[in-house]
Image: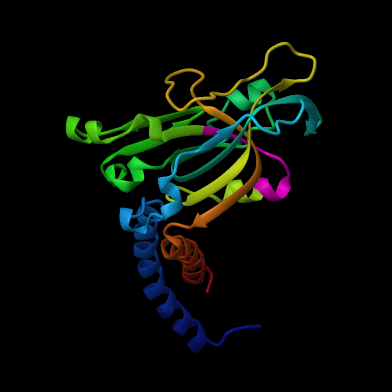
Amino acid sequence: MSLSREQARSLRRLASVVLPASLVAFALSLAMRNALPDKSLILEALLQEPVQTAEAIPAPFEITRKGVNYTVTPLFSYELWGMIVSYHHASSFIDISHKMWNDHLNIKDVCVIWGPNVESGVYERMRFRNRDFTCYYRYPDRETGALFTENALSNNHLLPADPLVADAILKARKGDQVHFKGWLVSYGHKGVPYARGSSTVRTDRGNGACETVWVEEFKILREANAAWRALYKLSLVLMVLSAAALIFI
């Protein structure tokens, strides 16, 4: 369908207004879509501690992902309610560890806080980030550090039990309040003596202090910044369309 000269001018005028507006909306939503929520929005469920038990632990089992055979050894049943403060995708282009180890089970790490750290709101004064297998956090002063409880933070290496669980894990973002359950496990390539383990306490630090979780259930209890995330996607589409209109019409 061809446009008349007047229709083309009208579309260009509209695009010339939409483009700068969408650029502003994109910049704002880019900054706000991963903001951590105010402590008033924290669900009561997140005030409880993770639950770890030694009951009904299944025997070690084998599983194949992307043609690689693994042996998974459950250690404890595990259940956690927390807020994601940072995360890392194993498929990230900056991640070389998972590719090097041929690890297709651990699809994502999520660093979460709960209990006193969400109740006090101390997280709003802190900075969190993730890299391969590690969660880092910083606080600006001693007062904040004294308020922060290290035993109410954990970095979790998540191994989904099936594609539906994997989809739920991958959708979770910074600021989301989540609940997941399954088993703390060790795992490795079938027939290889080395296995990647898991912390079984919340009080350890440093190398080996992360929880490795075989996830049977994963749920986002409250999504953060839903409006900002929707605006981010909409503004990106409008930027592309309005730029294309200015260039090609």
Colouring scheme, one of rainbow, by chain, secondary structure, one colour: rainbow
Residue 207 rendering spot, x and y as whole percentages: 48, 17
Which quadrant holds the N terminus?
A: bottom right
Image point (67%, 17%), residue name: 195
Closer to the camera, 154 or 245?
Answer: 154
Q: Position of residue 229 (x, y in %)?
A: 46, 60
User: Residue lying farthest front?
Assistant: 55
Q: Where 81 falls versus 102 (above or below)?
A: below
Q: Is residue 86 above or below residue 210?
A: below
| Picture quadrant of residue 193 | top right
Q: Is residue 93 visible?
A: no
Horizontal side of residue 209 vs 97, given as left or right = left
The residue drawn where x is 35% and y is 32% is 137
| Side of 225 where 72 appears, left or right | right
Is residue 42 shown to the viewer in this render? yes
Q: Quadrant of residue 226?
A: bottom left
* Nearest to the observer: residue 42 or residue 239: 42
Q: Residue furthest top?
A: 193
Q: Is residue 159 magenta?
A: yes
Range drawn in magenta = 156-166
> Quick check: 90 left or right of 17?
right
Relative to 91, does residue 41 appear above or below in the rendering? Answer: below
Q: Position of residue 77 (x, y in %)?
A: 63, 34
Q: Is residue 17 magenta?
A: no
Position of 180 with respect to 143 (left or right) is: right
Quick one: 52 or 182, which is closer to the camera? Answer: 52
Does residue 126 lie above or below 20 as drawn? above
